Image (cartoon, rainbow, N blue to C red):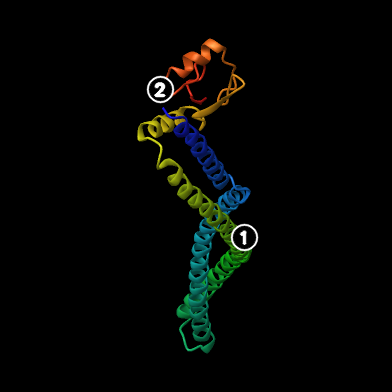
Amino acid sequence: MEINGLADLLDLQDVDLAIDRLLHQRQTLPELATYQEISARLELLESEHGRLSVDLRGLERDADKAEGELELIELKLKESETRLYAGGMSGRETEQKRLEVQSLRGQQGTMEERVLGVLDRLDPLREQVGQLEKQKTALAEEAKRFEQAIGSAWQDIDGQIARLEARKMGIAAPIPSGLVKLYDQLRRTKEGVAVGRLEGGVCGGCHLALSRPEQIEAAEWDPPRCIHCMRILVL
């Protein structure tokens, strides 16, 4: 295998490692962790807001119903009192109407307590839902700012990767396909480092020394391979 072809692999590896670093940077942006934290908090807020909003709508329906029933009772009471005080009824009818008025006043008192009880719960719940809405809005705006920052950073990184990919294609073009295939296989199993230059008898991939006989043995491989780590060696 020609030395020039092997040396090209070192250049190819430099580009691939640069791409790896950029991909890692893309996945580990500090803004990403913060954005994920904000998104988790926003999800919890939305869940809590949704639950309390359902409770609020139910309580508002209860309030409307109670106020409607109170209004009907008050209307009946007014009619009964008017009829009672107008006179013109028999003693028996008067007594029945008096008892009816008494009953309606009792119902009125009970319903007024019910309405007040619902209203006492309604106002704090409305306040709580309102506060959650404000928190949701603030968090959503914060999440949007981080989305924009992440998008901008990714755009810059993706541009750098695209330029490196174009450079990689140019470097890889003259390298025999079989050698590129071996290089790709080794990169997957050797933490991205498939090629090492042999300098001073030391493998640039695993940084272990090769004795003179081991160097001769390594050179007999096609392409040359380190006897320790089996990476491609550039002699």
Q: Which mark is residue 142?
A: 1
Q: Which mark is residue 209?
A: none
Image spot of residue 141 (x, y percent): 60, 63
**In which quadrant of the rendered view does residue 210 lie?**
top right
In this view, 18 is above or below 75: above
Pick the front one: 2 or 71: 2
> For the point 49% across and 27% down, which residue is it?
190
Q: CA distance from mark 1 to mark 2?
A: 57 Å
> For the point 39% across and 31% down, which residue is it?
179
**Residue that numbered label 2 is attached to:** 222
Is 83 displayed left or right of 123 in the figure? left
Reading the chain from its start, which is encountered first: label 1 or label 2?
Answer: 1
**Dividing the image into 4 quarters, which one contains the N terminus?**
top left
Callout 2: helix, strand or loop? Answer: loop
In this view, 116 is above or below 197: below
Image spot of residue 27 (x, y percent): 54, 45
Image spot of residue 181 (x, y percent): 38, 32
In this view, 140 is above or below 30: below
The kind of residue tagged 1 is Glu
